[in-house]
Image: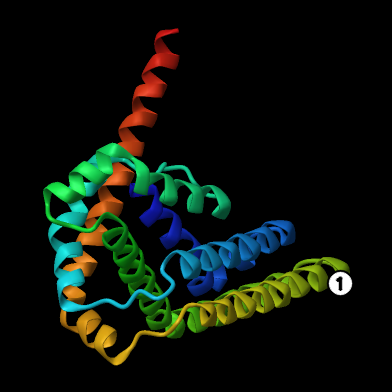
Amino acid sequence: MRGTVVGLMALLALVAGTGWVAQTAEPTMESAAAAYSEWIDAMVEFTRGVEIDEKGMRAFLDHWGALNELDVVESDDEDAAEFTESLHEALTDPRYRSWAEGRELEPKKFLQTSMRIMSLFMVQQTEGQRALAAQEWKDYSAVVEEQCAHVDEQTCRQMRQGLADSKAMGEAMQKTLAKLPPPSAQEQALLERYAAEVEALMEGDDDDYEDEDYYEDDDSNDDDDNS
């Protein structure tokens, strides 16, 4: 389940950080945009008809952290189809159903509501970074123009084209956000009321995942050193 959060955050960061996208190769940008669109489609389908209410928000805040320990959704599901499949498999996983029912949670509704909360929160975080992304874009444009003074005309043209392509890709990915149904008045009010708690929960989840990767990499390096 940790990978669900991290995966979504990474995809949404591509939209906000057009400067980062500008440094990647075009095939990578296209595949990232396609993956992002597929994830949004999967999220829309899985959460169709779900509206966050006070009870659902409180359940998410109170129980999401504990659910991570089950790892009922594969942490490396980068493919949207596999991600969707893992979500549906979780709904039939005896561990998850027992965990949810033991907390008087309706298994499907809890998972759907949690996905809805996370997707809306991350979209709003991305929207809030637009000003920063615009400034980063200006900074990268200035760097390209500065470099153009020291390279040949063809290289300069390629750099400018790459920058323009990445901007177009970022704009296309921004439009993809429109696939997600916007928050209702009730949902928006809840997101604003509990913004600090949701952010703390999700940032804590992300930090745990990164720490886990760090120690796994460290152990791997130790094994290599001992071999």
Q: Secondary structure at mark 1?
A: helix
Can residue 149 be seen from the camera position used here?
no
Considering only vertical position in the picture, is 198 above or below 168?
above
Q: How is the image coloured?
A: rainbow
Considering only vertical position in the picture, is 51 above or below 217?
below
Side of 65 relative to 180 (left or right): left
Q: Position of residue 116 (x, y in %)?
A: 35, 70
Query: Circle 1: is it few (<14), some (14-19), or many (20+) Cα within 10 Å?
Result: few
Q: Position of residue 106 (x, y in %)?
A: 23, 58
* Outermost residue to the right: 154
Q: Which residue does the image show at 50% across and 48% down from the upper left?
A: 85
Nearer the observer, 149 or 92: 92
Q: Which residue does the image show at 16% across and 77% down from the upper left?
A: 54
Can residue 86 be seen from the camera position used here?
yes
Name the quarter where the C terminus is drawn: top left
Nearer the observer, 128 or 185: 185
Q: Which residue does the image show at 34% across and 37% down from the upper left?
A: 214
Side of 1 relative to 62 (left or right): right
Residue indicated by mark 1 = 153
Counting the numbered discs, the total is 1
When asked about the image quadrant of residue 119, the answer is: bottom left
When asked about the image quadrant of residue 183, the answer is: bottom left
Query: Hey, what amino acid is under mark 1?
Result: Glu
Q: Position of residue 99 (x, y in %)?
A: 19, 44
Nearer the observer, 123 or 99: 99
